[in-house]
Amino acid sequence: MIYYQYPPYYTPNTRYVPPSPWKKPATPKQPLPHPQNIKKSNDNIMFELFGISLYFDDVLLICLIFFLYNEGVKDKYLFIALILLLLS
């Protein structure tokens, strides 16, 4: 009888096929490291206006919103998505 890596499809004549002796034993999985808290450090502040810190990604989103508005883009859901991304 030929030993398969996986058991064959079910048939009435199917018997238990032991695991292959050449297969490596399962190693325990390493726990995933906890992601570090992602905080914007004070070194990356581009502007600070009236106590509001603006970082590079914030300035980039503001410029993108301004450019799309000036070009006359009428997609209101795009603007909503960009503003929500800016607020997060």
Image (cartoon, rainbow, N blue to C red):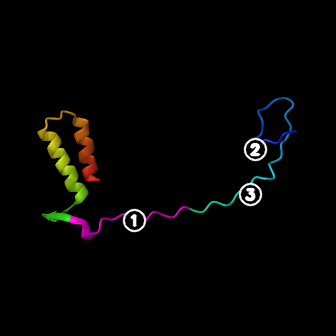
Residue 52 as seen in the image, left or right of residue 5: left
Which residue does the numbered mark 2 point to in the structure image?
5
Q: Which residue is mark 1?
A: 37
Q: Amino acid at mark 1?
A: Asn
Q: Is there CB contact under 8 Å for labels 1 and 3?
A: no
Tell me which segment is drawn in magenta: 32-45
How many residues crowd mark 1 within 10 Å: few (<14), some (14–19), many (20+)? Answer: few
Residue 51 is labelled as none
Q: Magenta stretch: residue 36 in it?
A: yes
Q: Give the residue type at disc 2.
A: Gln
Q: Position of residue 31 (x, y in %)?
A: 58, 62
- In the orientation shown, which residue stands out farthest toward the bottom? 43
Residue 10, given in percent of the width and then of the height, sits at 79, 32
Residue 37 image point, x, y percent: 39, 65
Pointers 2 and 3 in contact (CB under 8 A)? no
Q: Residue at x 25, y 39 (%)?
A: 78
